[in-house]
Amino acid sequence: MFLLERLKTYAGTDRTAILYGGEVLSYARLDAWSDAFAAWLLARFGEDRTPILIYGHKELSIPACMFGALKSGRGYVPVDTTFPRERVAQIVEAVRPRVIVDFCGLGLEAPAVLDGMALTEILESGGTADRGTWITPGQTAYILFTSGSTGQPKGVQITAGNIAAFSRGVDSLLRCEGEGGTFLNAISYSFDVSVCALYYALSRGMTLYTVDRAALNDARSLFAALAASGIDIWVSTPSLGELCLQSEQFDRGLLPRVQKFIFCGEVMTSKLGREVRRRFPGARVYNAYGPTETTVLVTAVEATDALCAAGETVPIGYGFGNLTCQIADPETGALLPDGQQGELRILGECVSPGYLGDPERTARSFFERDGVRGYRTGDLCSRENGMIYYYGRLDGQVKLNGFRVELEDVERNLTKVPNIARAAVVPEYRGALVQGLTAYVLLEAPDGLGSLQRAKRIKEALGALVPSYMVPRKIVAVDAFPLNTNGKVDKKALSAGGKP
Ligand code: AMP
C-alpha cells in the first residue's frame, strides 16, 4: 500500500508526522509503532483478519493502531468518543472485533481489550512486520459507521483499492506547494474527511497539526492552537470556517502560510467563500463534495469571486478525472440531460463494496454498470457544462455542523426513551445550512414536568443511545401530530408552529 511504503521512506528522515498539544510523533516512530502493533496482532491472532475497533478521539497512537492493522493485513473501525456506549455496543455486535483499543474504559468485551497503557507497551515492544502481510487492494481497510435510518448505525466498508483511487482523484486539490508542509487535522477519525489527513497528507511527508474537540469548542484555545500551527492546507466543514470567521483574528496574521482552504461535508455558502478570500489574500478556496460511500471526496471547484457572485451557495463542482458522475431520474434510473435535476450517481474505483452485513441496503444504494461500481448518493443535483449544482437530499438525511444525521435514526431512538410514544424530528435551517434539530414528541402519559425539565430528561436519555451531535437542541411535547394528506406526520406544519 502506497501510504505504508511512504511511511517507511519518511521514517528515514527527521520529519514530524503528527503534532498534538505539546506532543510530537515523528515518521520514524509512527512507522516503528505501527510495525510493532502489526507484529503483535499477527503473533496473537494468526490467520484471523477481523478488523480491530478503536474507541478514542485524537490520541497520538491511534494512527499507529490503524496503520499497524493495515500492516497485519486487517482493517480497522475508528469510533469517536461522541458515540455513547450503547451505540458502540451495536457496532461491536456488527463487527465482532477480536481486538478493541479503548482509550476511555467503556468496558466492552472482546478477546483482547487494550487500554492506553497496554497499548503503549505493545507499541514500544520493538516488533517488526514483513511487507508480505500488508493489506491488499481488495481488502477492507476501514469501516466507518454513519447514521442509519433504521435507528442502527450502518458500516461503510472502504478497501485499500478505494483509498488508492481517492488519493489519485484528490491529488491536485490537496497538493501543497513546496516541501513538507502542515495540514490541519481537526476532523474526528471516525469521519471520512479525516482520511485526507491520514492518507493524503501523511503519504506526502506533511505534518498533521491536531486540533481536538475540546479546542474546537473553546474559541480561545482554538485561536491559540491556530496561531501556533503554521498551517499550509486547511480542510474542514464550512461550519468550522464560519465559526472562525466570527472572530476578527481569523486572517493572514493568524495563518501566514495557508495556501488552500478546502471546505467539504455540507453546503458552502458564497458568503463564506468571499469572506475567506478577503481575509486571506492569495489563498485559494475550494468547495469539495463526497459521501463516505465513495471514499471522502469526488467533486470540487475553486470558489472564485466570479463563482461566489453567481449564487447564494457554491456549486459542488466537477467530478474528479478518474470517476464518472451521472444525473439520473431517481425513480427510473434514466440519465437526464444537462440542466435537469435528478439524483447524483458516482461510478468508479472509489465506490465502496457496500455496507457491512447488510446486503439489502447495499443492493438498494449500490449498483454495477459494465463492470464499474456505482453509488446512488440520494443527493438532488443538476449539471451544466460539467459543473454540478447541489439542491438538497431526496431523503431524510441532513448535515448538522458537517455531521451526517438521518432524522429517522433520531426519531427511532427517541421512541426508545421511556414515556415517548412517537417522535418527529425537524431540521432548523438558517439560509442553506441546518443550525439545529427540534424533536416533537408525543408522550404516552402526562409526566407532570415543566418543559425545561422534560427536555433535559429526554436529552439525557437519548444521549445514552446516539452520538451527542444527534441529540436535538429543542424538545417540544405535542398533544397530537398534524398529518398531511398521505396520513404521514406533516413536518412542515410542525416546524411552522402549526398546531394539530
Ligand atoms: P458524509 O458521508 O458524512 O461525508 O456525507 C455525505 C453527504 O454530505 C453528501 O451525500 C451530501 O448530502 C453532503 N455533502 C457533502 N459535501 C457537500 C458539499 N460540498 N455541499 C453540499 N452537500 C455536501
Image (spheres, helix red, strand yellow):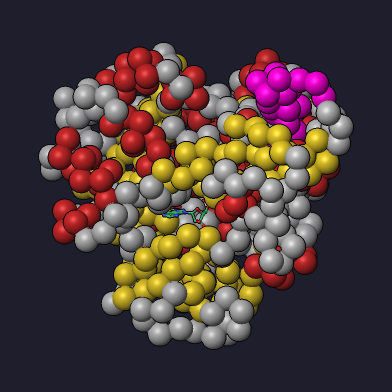
Magenta highlight on residue 361: no
Left or right relative to 215: residue 132: right
| Residue 373 % position (x, y) | 59, 73
The stretch of residues the image draws in magenta is 447-467
In the image, 197 versus 151, the foreground residue is 151
Is 161 placed above or below 479 here? below
| Residue 357 % position (x, y) | 79, 57
Residue at (20, 46) in percent of width and height: 274
Q: Is residue 366 visible?
A: yes
Residue at (51, 43) in percent of width and height: 428
In the displayed image of the protein, which residue is found farthest to the front?
499
Left or right relative to 316: residue 1: right
Is 490 placed above or below 261 here? below
Is 247 placed above or below 163 here? above
Residue at (38, 47) in percent of width and height: 431
Q: How many marks?
A: 0
Magenta segment main secondary structure: helix
Magenta highlight on residue 458: yes
- Report which quarter residue 450 is drawn in: top right
Residue at (61, 79) in percent of width and height: 331
